[in-house]
Image (cartoon, rainbow, N blue to C red):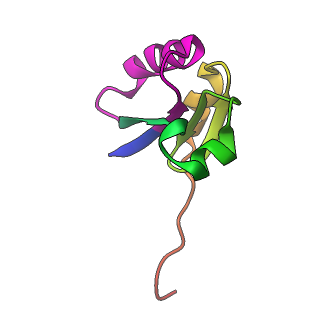
Amino acid sequence: MREVIVYSRDGCHLCEAMIEQVAPLCRGIADIVVRDVYTRDDWLTAFGLDIPVLFLDNREVCRHFFDERAFREALNNPVATPRDGG
């Protein structure tokens, strides 16, 4: 199963909207993980108030507002992973 990560914070209306918009597109395709940037210093340093930020398979797809076109493109073009042993 693929993974969608949304960096967020409690009470952020933009974050809530992004999660609501991406959820129907993830059913049966990807798990959604919501990470509160205030729970870890490294997330707060990386994103601060520059949220929400959505990642698919460890690749940033969009910030601030959900970009359905970019998300669908990322779904259809997964990043190739190198093979071990050549």
Outermost residue on the bottom side: it is 85
Residue placed at 50% from the left, 15% from the top? 11
Q: Position of residue 61 (x, y in %)?
A: 63, 36
Residue situated in front as seen by the camera: 51 or 26: 51
Residue found 32% across the figure and 46% down from its top: 1
Q: Where residue 60 sits in the image (x, y, percent)?
A: 63, 42
Q: Residue 84 appears at what percent x and percent y?
A: 46, 82
Tell me what residue is drawn at x 66 percent, y 31 percent.
62
Residue at x 54%, y 20% (from the top left corner): 15
With respect to residue 80, does 52 lie above or below?
above
Q: Is residue 32 above or below residue 85?
A: above
Can residue 70 be seen in the rendering of this structure? yes
Please, is residue 12 above or below residue 81 in the view? above
In the image, 17 versus 48, the foreground residue is 48
**Residue 9 part of the magenta-drawn span:** yes
Residue 51 highlighted magenta (yes or no) = no
Residue 75 can be seen, yes or no: no
Q: Residue 36: x percent and y percent?
A: 48, 34
Number of numbered discs overlaid on the protein picture: 0
The image shows residue 80, relative to residue 49, as above or below, that is below
Q: Which residues are magenta?
A: 5-29
Front residue of this view, candidates 74 and 11: 11
